[in-house]
Amino acid sequence: MSHKIKHSTAHLVAAAVLKLYPKTKFAIGPAIEDGFYYDFDFKKKISEEDLVKIEREVEKLIKTNLVFKKKAVSLKEARSIFKDQPFKLELIKQLEKEGKKKALLYQSGDFVDLCKGPHVEKSNQIGALKLLSLAGAYWQGDEKKPMLTRIYGVAFKTKAELKKYLQQLEEAKKRDHRKLSKDLDLFSQNSQLGPGLILWHPKLAFVREEIELWWRQEHRKRGYQYVYTPHIGRKELWDTSGHTGFYQDLMYPPMKNKRGDTYFLKPMNCNGHVLIYQSSPRSYRDLPIRYCELGTVYRYEPEGVRHGILRPRCFTQDDAHIICRQDQVVEEIEAALDFALEMNAVFGFKNLRYELSLNDPKDKKKYVGQQHQWQFAQETLRKILKKRGVEFKESIGEAKFYGPSIDLKAEDAIGRLWQGTTIQFDFNLPGRFKMSYVNQKGKKETPFMIHRTLLGSMERFVGILIEQYTGAFPTWLSPVQAIILPITDDQLAFAQKTESQLKEAKIRTEINGDSEPIGAKIRKAEKEKIPFILVVGQKEVEINQVNLRKRGGQQEGAKDNQEIIKLIRKEIDNKL
Ligand SMILES: [Zn+2]
Ligand SMILES: [Zn+2]
């Protein structure tokens, strides 16, 4: 979806709304990643059914082949054009405050909007659109301001692109982790506990445990050392790192004790790792040091940003901090990148998009450190990506406050992109904490630090996996790997014997001994997405075998227990 097409369609939606509902006040209509929206204050509430009517009106406008004309007018003139539009008047007031003398407008047909553009030249460049949904949204995201009606939509150059998008949307609905979580009993939230806090149910805990066990093994292999750090720390610590200055909006409010000590819940794991480093003197020979932790952090994400398990307020990062000398930085970042690619590939994420997140030199309040340091760090990362010959997008203003990063977006089974890995180059925290090591000449030097997470957070990552696999986890991650279904009670004892053999081979196994017809039991096991279904009837008992079928209905026939164990173990051991 091109930005110009999305945003130009938003204008036409506003034009159509004003035509159909002339008393409506219109606010803003930006393009967003997934399309566009426009916010309105309707005199009379509209419903989802009205969207079709608005859509038809927009289509009519497109056909008249409107030209998008840009012009600059004085603020006074702008005020008179939008005299009946309170939201636009507020925006003009804002322009005045910023010292602007002119307002930029775009006109298409009778409709004029306050807007910097850019737009398509003519409306026939919009090939297809669809208005998707309605939502409530506060004016300027402020809970104290009026609640507006937001219309979401998408727009494309061609009808074929729209069709493909709608099919993908349909597929995405089937995969929605919130829906699947209910069906499969994976996680929940509870208002008594607080919004954005995830309760992991036993089945999803199995998935996490498997990932964590493997994660630990892989980190050991690569010379990482595990550490554990507390979840709270004194205010002074967060002052030193700069979090209270640059990150406090995302932190939970402080805790004060009677003696006047103030503590914060940690929003990041970095500081604990820095303090472990500082617990004894370090020499150049000790570096690199790679501390890793499945570290739980707390971030008070704004209400509009929270999204199921994908963006909660408490989550566990698969975090690590690599402390190294300048001459080791490139090698360490490259190794972290390779590690990330390997990890992603295990889950079927083989198509990765690279992004280089940079600071915005104009926004000094958002970042610590000097611009020349930023340039050095950014150039280092840019060189690494160029050397690899990968395509990457540079995003200005997306860096964390302490340094730039390489971020990887993984493409899932239906072509959606998910942010997971981030590798950040930090030249700030070591200095702020006065970290040091003794160099070859016996002099103290400040090390560099690399912050990295490969999966992102456990919460977000399993949320992505639920959608990636539509809840049908591969065998190694499946909460229940095999289920044994005796046809009648007569085979129960035989089933139990099989169960204990499978369990001994460390296969997560259950028996469904309910007195239901076997067809119903199979359907239930399929619904629970269990990878191996073992059916035992009288015939099987007599030949000392069980009938094996795989998830999805594939029949494997009668096999003895040892064969079955070998088959299932092979999938588990190969992470299939
Ligand atoms: Zn515009
Ligand atoms: Zn960190």
Image (tube, grey):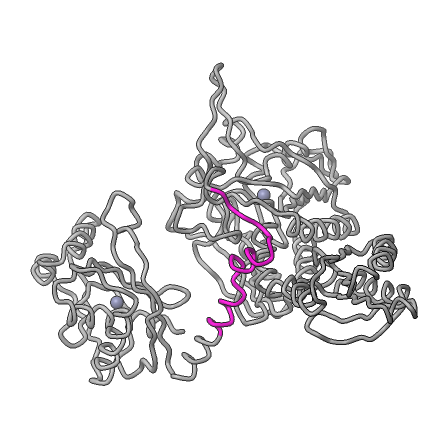
**Residue occupying image coordinates x 31% and y 80%:** 126
Could one spot residue 380 in this view of the protein? no
Q: In terms of image quadrants, where is residue 104?
A: bottom left
Magenta span contains residue 182: yes
Query: Is residue 238 placed above or below 569 in the rendered structure?
Result: above
The correct choice, above or below, for 139 with respect to 134 in the image is above
Q: Is 286 part of what is drawn in magenta?
A: no
- Relative to 241, say whether 166 is above or below: below
Extreme residue toward the top, this view = 259
In the image, 20: left or right of 123?
left
In this rendered view, identify the residue nearer to me: 561 or 163.
561
Is any atom of residue 69 visible in this view?
yes
Percent x, y for residue 514? 71, 57
Question: Relative to residue 535, is residue 517 drawn left or right?
Answer: left
Where, quadrant-wise, is the C terminus in this rendering? bottom right
Total marks placed: 0
Residue 575 placement (x, y as % from top left): 75, 62
In this rendering, position of residue 562 left or right of residue 168: right
Quarter of the image where the N terminus is located: bottom left
Q: Position of residue 404 (x, y in %)?
A: 52, 52
Q: Which residues are magenta?
A: 168-190
In the foreground, 482 or 409: 482
Residue 206 in the image: state x and y as whole percent. 69, 51
**Looking at the image, is 199 positioned above or below residue 23?**
above
Q: Main secondary structure of the magenta part?
A: helix
Ligand 2 picture quarter: top right
Residue 292 falls in image quadrant:
top right
The foreground one among 210 and 507 is 507
